[in-house]
Image (cartoon, grey):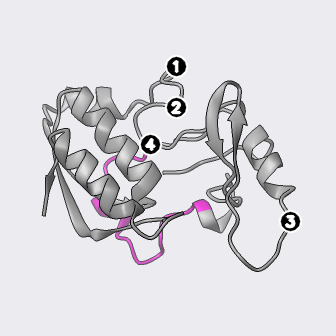
Amino acid sequence: MCWRCRTGIALTMAASLPVSGEPVYPLGELNGLAQIWWPDHGIQGSTDAELHPDIDRSLIDAVFHKGQDIDVDSYSAFFDNGHCRKTELDSWLQARGITHLVMLGIATTTALSIAVLDVLELGYQVTVVKEGCSGVNLNPEDSEIVFAQIKAQGAVLI
């Protein structure tokens, strides 16, 4: 779950972008890593960072936050973008003997795809529910390209 600091460099840069009515996602660099300057989202303490009110929280065993480092973004639910820091999600899954993940979500072309590649590298089996995914496509074909890439790396698409 995105839980970004209010003062992160990426957020400061994104907030300074001109507003033209059209989405503009310029490419840049953040501490040596390629970075897309997304609009502010998932800010700690904002309603944007909360679970949807219709989600039955009694079914949730744990919540893991990402994007908390002010100096590096975190697309994956498992690592920051530089793979320097890991969230606690992998160790939580391992402690419970979970080896197969069913994944879906928004931002197919960033958060979902990078998390899928991370968990495949960590040795999990992964099934991606395409109908439950939505891409932030900078180009119209981006999501389909990502689906082909994660399938080629071993994810099962349904």
Tag 4 and tag 2, C-beta contact below 8 Å: no
Residue 9 picture location, percent across and down: 78, 39
Q: Earlier in the sequence, mark 4 or mark 2?
A: 4
In the picture as drawn, the residue positioned furthest to the top comes out as 84
Q: Earlier in the sequence, mark 3 or mark 4?
A: 3
Mark identifier at residue 84: 1
Mark identifier at residue 2: none
Tag 4 and tag 1, C-beta contact below 8 Å: no
Q: Secondary structure at mark 1?
A: loop
The answer to whether residue 10 is left or right of residue 129 is right
Does the magenta stretch mainly form a helix, a strand or a loop? loop
Q: Earlier in the sequence, mark 3 or mark 2?
A: 3
Residue 108: quadrant of the picture: bottom left
Q: Earlier in the sequence, mark 4 or mark 1?
A: 4
Q: Which residue is mark 3?
A: 18
Q: Which residue is mark 2?
A: 80
The amino acid type of the residue labelled 2 equals Asp
Residue 38 picture location, percent across and down: 66, 56
Residue 132 picture location, percent across and down: 29, 70
Find out whether residue 61 is within the magenta segment. yes
Tag 1 and tag 2, C-beta contact below 8 Å: yes
Q: Which residues are magenta?
A: 49-64
The amino acid type of the residue labelled 3 equals Pro
Q: Which residue is mark 4?
A: 64
The answer to whether residue 147 is left or right of residue 81 is left
Residue 39 picture location, percent across and down: 70, 61
Find out whether residue 52 is within the magenta segment. yes
Q: What is the count of numbered marks?
A: 4
Q: Earlier in the sequence, mark 1 or mark 3?
A: 3
Q: Is residue 105 above or below residue 20?
A: above
Q: CA distance from mark 3 to mark 2?
A: 27 Å
Tag 3 and tag 2, C-beta contact below 8 Å: no
